[in-house]
Amino acid sequence: MRIFDLDLQLIHDSIFLAINVFILFTLMSYLLFNPVRDMLNKRRERIQNDIETAAQNKDDAIALKAEYEAKLKEIDKEAEMILSEARRKALKREEEIVNEAKEEANRILERAHSEVVLEQKRAVDDMKKEMIRIASIMAGKVVAQSMDMEIQDTLIEETLKEMGDSTWQN
C-alpha cells in the first residue's frame, strides 16, 4: 500500500529513525547536555561569585581608602598640633631667654650704679679728708700762734659746713 508515495519500509524506517533519534537525544541529553548544563551552571555560579567578590573587594577597598584618608587627616592634625606645640614652646623659651637677659642687664646696671655710688662716696670722702688736711695746714699756719686746738676744730667744722656736701658731690 502506498499512500502519498509512502511504503511500509519507509514508515518503518521513519519510525525506527524517530525512535533512534529520541533514544540518541535522551542518551546525549544524559551524557552530554546535562554535564554541559552543569558545567555552564557552575561557570555561571563562579562568575556570579567572582562578581560578588569583586564588589565586596571594591567596597572593602573604598572603606580602607576612607580609613587611610581619615588616618592621614588625623596624622596631619597631629603633625600640625606637634608643630604648633613646638612653636609655642619655642616662643615661651624665647620669652624666658629675653626676660633672663633683661634681668641680667638690670643686675649689671644696678651693680654698676652701686659701684659708681661707692666710687662717688669714696671720692667725696677722699676729697673731704684732703680738704680737712689742707684746711688744717692752712689754719695751722694762719693761726698757729694765737689759737688753741678747740678754736681750730671749730673753724674747720664751720668751713666744711659752709662748703656743704653738695660741693663735694659735683
Image (tube, rainbow, N blue to C red):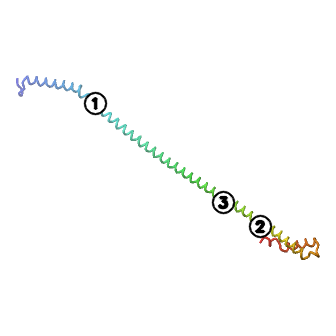
Give the spatial CA distance, label 2 vs label 1.
Answer: 117 Å
Image marks 3 and 1: residues in contact by CB distance under 8 Å:
no
Question: Which x, y percent locates residue 137?
Answer: 87, 73
Disc 2 versus disc 1: nearer the observer: 2
How many marks can you see? Answer: 3
Question: Which x, y percent locates residue 42?
Answer: 30, 31
Quarter location, residue 159: bottom right
Q: Residue at x 63, y 58 (%)?
A: 98
The residue where tag 3 is placed is 102
Q: Amino acid type of disc 3?
A: Lys
The residue where tag 2 is placed is 120
Image marks 2 and 3: residues in contact by CB distance under 8 Å:
no
Q: Is residue 46 left or right of residue 106?
A: left
Q: Nearer the viewer, residue 162 or 156?
A: 156
Q: Amino acid type of disc 1?
A: Met
In the displayed structure, 132 sits above or below 76; it is below
Q: Is residue 68 left or right of residue 5?
A: right
Q: Is residue 61 left or right of residue 29?
A: right
Q: For numbered disc 3, what is the local secondary structure?
A: helix
Which mark sits nearer the N-terminus, 2 or 3?
Answer: 3
Quarter location, residue 47: top left
Q: Amino acid type of disc 2?
A: Gln
Q: For numbered disc 2, what is the local secondary structure?
A: helix
Instruction: Return the mark for residue 82.
Output: none
Q: Residue at x 54, y 50 (%)?
A: 82
Quarter location, residue 115: bottom right
Which mark sits nearer the N-terminus, 3 or 1?
Answer: 1
Question: Which x, y percent locates residue 34?
Answer: 25, 28
The residue where tag 1 is placed is 39
